[in-house]
Structures are given as structure tokens and as C-alpha cells.
Image (tube, rainbow, N blue to C red):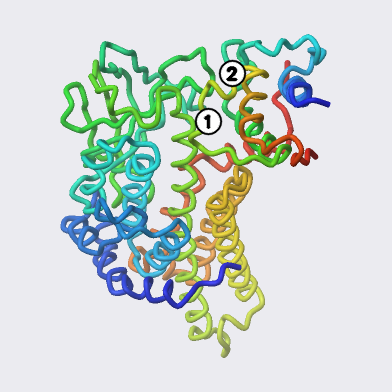
Amino acid sequence: MDITQVIREFVVTEYLPDTPPDELEVDYDLFRNGVINSLDLLRLISWLKDHFGIPVDELDIVPENFRTVAAIRDFVDSALPAPAERTLK
Amino acid sequence: MYEWSEEHRELRAEFAHWYETLGEGHLEADRDSGLPPRAWERVRASGLLRLPFHAEWGGRGLDLLSTMYVLEGLGEGCRDGGLCFSICTQIVSAGIPLQRFGSAELKARHLPGICDGGTITAHAITDPNGGSDVLGMGMTAKPDGDDWILDGDKVFVTNGPVADLIVVYALTDASLGPFGLTAFLVERGTEGVLAGADVPKMGLRTSPLGELSLRGCRVPAANVLGRPGMGFAVLDHVMRWEILCSFIVQVGAMQHRLDRCVEHATRRRQFGRPIGSFQMIADQIVDMKIGVETSRRWLYDAAEGFVRGRDVTTDIAIAKVLASEANVKSALSAVQIFGGRGYLTETGLEKDLRDAVGGTIYSGTSEMQRIRIARMLGLKESQT
């Protein structure tokens, strides 16, 4: 499963349980639409650290990294090592 | 368990003679309330305020764990819980976020005064109508040219009545959810800033606590910590430091209380034998020991994970609940073990109990910490 789909499924499962994963557009604004509150954000960051094994520094916690599924994917992409070295859980 | 080096022990010993001095007259200070006269001068002279700040601003450059180790000694040696609380607030409220998120200019301007204690600091988080839900706050900030205009009120501001520099968290865009919050550095003399008087409270009476009102308060955009919208990340970082530092102080206090109870239970005799030989007294003391050890380990372990970049959201919440609740239980047991004398003000144990109760409330209530843990486990909000 590609990274976008993994993230989309997590977001849907955690925060939008009534939405089929494929209906969540990758550019859907998760903040303006009230999908993610502050406790949700903590869990999302924790999941990103655990699942992708990437360090999330406080300085990375800016809206452009978390606003949409696409933004989260880009953030993960930029933090991950080259694809050949990836070990996804 | 974390192993402390000889260097660490020497460092702690270096401050040892200050601890008792800082707590002198603590019973009278508690009765009188407010920051004890001359106490802050002694705090400044001790150098404790410099611990975690870089040398270029006059700090000691210690890492988090070493800072905590010295602060644990403070809790063990200084009987003035309120003063210890104000010291922790001074270290974490503005200095820590400034060092981590502030611009070079802001650091150069304020950190030397924070290290030296000539600048007293506070942070204003809680809304009069809110509490743990920081995004429900009424303090707003609106951009105006190169400035921001802050409007609103804050309550429960530790050091607020005497602070020169306050980090104020304000809502800058409610529609951005967790990114709607921004942290501003506000100087006391700024027009529109009004700090209220010390509010009477149950415990920690030597740590001044007040309200803060901002009316059309103009703050330069350069005073934003991090960037607009990063207030949540700043607050989360500060809260981790606050919990680790202020509760390791309490672990020190619990250790002191445990030693005192062991000594009392060994010396005090009833029915021809030491009261410590009665199982019911021994059980209470054993639980005090378990509380100290568990809290200490969780706090240092969470701190080590935090420094290593591990996700410690749950660990910090667990450590906070454990330490704060163990402290209340330990203080209550000490009053019970000392019996009638424990109930007297002169023993200082009833003050310990009053001080301890605050710990289950500030820095996120036990209830809020449990909600955090539940959410981190994936237990969701009700959808109805």
C-alpha cells in the first residue's frame, strides 16, 4: 500500500469513521473542516513516529505539514530515507 | 534506572547548601503568603535559575536530566514548596520556549535576565471560562501592521503578580484547530497589560498566583515564539518541561518526607514498641517508598525518551498522574503517621498536604491526563 493510502486509512479510521477511505480527497482541509483537534494531532504525530519511524520535532509541527492527507504524505516523504531503505511496519 | 555520574553528584552537591537557606522561615512565609521578602534575592544568588540555559546567555548549559537531578535535590532540601514552584515556573515558562523557539534577537534581549533572575517570568495559559481545552480560550490576537493586538483575560498565572515577562497564549485563527494558537512574549510595561494581585489559595502560598488582563495590547510580531500558529507546539514543549521539572521537585520532597516518617516511626513508641513495628504504619511507609520510586523512575524515563526524540506523550501523562497522586497520598500518610503533631502547622506536614493537592490540578488535571492517555490508546471521542 502506498504512503498516501496508509495515511488516508489512518485518518479515516481515527477521525472520520463514517467516511469510506477513497472518498477522502487528499487535499481536504483537515483543520478548517474540524476533523483534527489538538488531542487528535498528538495521536497523529505519535502514529507517524511509530509507523514510519520518523522523528517529529516540535519545529515540524506547523500547519503546512498536517493540513491535508497530501501534506502529511509530503512531510513523511521528506523525512523518510530513500525508498530502498524503508522498512514500513 | 538512570545512573548518575560522579559529575552529577558533584553538581548537586554544589547547590546543596542553598536548599535549606532557600526554605528558611517557610512556616511563617506560608502564613504570610506571597513571595517571601528577600527569598528571590537568595534564589538569584543560588544560580539555580541558570541550569538549563546556554552559557552564551549566562546559563549553565545543563541538559534536561541534569537539570532535573539538581531540582530533585531542591525538593529534598528546601521545605518551601511554593518557592520551589515559582523557581520551576521561572525556568520553564518563558526561558525554555524562548531558548527553543525564540529569535536570536529575543534570546539576546531576555535570556540573560531570565538566567540571572532579574527578569521574573510567567506564562498565561488558562482562560477564565476554559481550562484544559486551550483552543476554547477567549484571549485573541489580531494582526495589525507589524504588530499583533492582544485582547482577553487569563487566570491562574503563577508568578503573574510579580512577573516582568509573560508568555501569553492567544487564539489567532479559530478555524485552524490545533494551529489556531500562537505564543507571544509580552513585557509587563506594555500598554494595556494589567496584572492582578496575589489570589489566596489552599497551598503553594509562597508562589504568587494572579490574573492577567490584556486590553488592546500591542505586541510586535517579532515577539511571537516560533511562528503564528505554533502556539500548540510551544505549549506542548513547555508542558513537558514543566511536568518533568516541577514533579521531580516533588519526588525530592516525597523522599524527604519518607525519611522523616521512617525516622519518626523508629523513634516514637507506643505500647512499649516503635510505631513502625505496627504493620499498619509500616504499610503506609512502604507505600510512600513505592510512590517515590515509581514517580522518580517514570519521570526520568520519560525525560530520557523526550531527549532522545521518542514519543513520550503518554509517558509524560502517566508520570504526571503517578507523581502528583503519590505526593498527595504520601503527604496524607505523613500527617496520619505523625498523628496529632502532624495536624499541627508547626510540623509543616499539613502545609505539605495543601501544597500537594495543587499538583493533581496544575499542568493539566489528573482527569485531563487520563483523557490524553485514553486518546493516545485510540479510544475515541463519542461521535454522538
- The amino acid pointed to by label 1 is Ile
| Residue B155 against residue B345 in the figure, above or below | above
| Residue B109 against residue B325 in the figure, above or below | above
The residue closer to the viewer here, B157 or B311, is: B311
The number of numbered discs placed on residues in the rendered structure image is 2
Name the N-terminal-most of marks 2 and 1: 1
What residue is at 63 percent from the left and 80 percent from the top? B278
Side of A31 where B39 appears, left or right: left
Side of B259 where B117 appears, left or right: left
The residue closer to the viewer here, B56 or A63, is: B56
What residue does disc 2 label?
A67
Q: Residue A65 lies in what quarter of the image?
A: top right
The quadrant the C terminus of chain A occupies is: top right
Q: Which mark, by number, is residue A61?
A: 1
Instruction: Report x, y in % for residue B188.
Output: 20, 33
Q: Residue A37 lies in what quarter of the image?
A: top right
What residue is at 28 percent from the left and 16 percent from the top? B149
Task: Please state the chain letter of the residue tagged with numbered disc 2 in the rendered image.
Answer: A
Q: Answer few, some or many: residues within 10 Å of disc 2's Cα (few below 14, many 20 plus, some between 14 and 19).
A: many
- The amino acid pointed to by label 2 is Arg
Q: Check disc 1 and report its element: helix, strand or loop.
A: loop
The quadrant the N terminus of chain A occupies is: top right
Q: How far apart, in angstroms, are the residues tagged by discs 2 and 1?
A: 11 Å
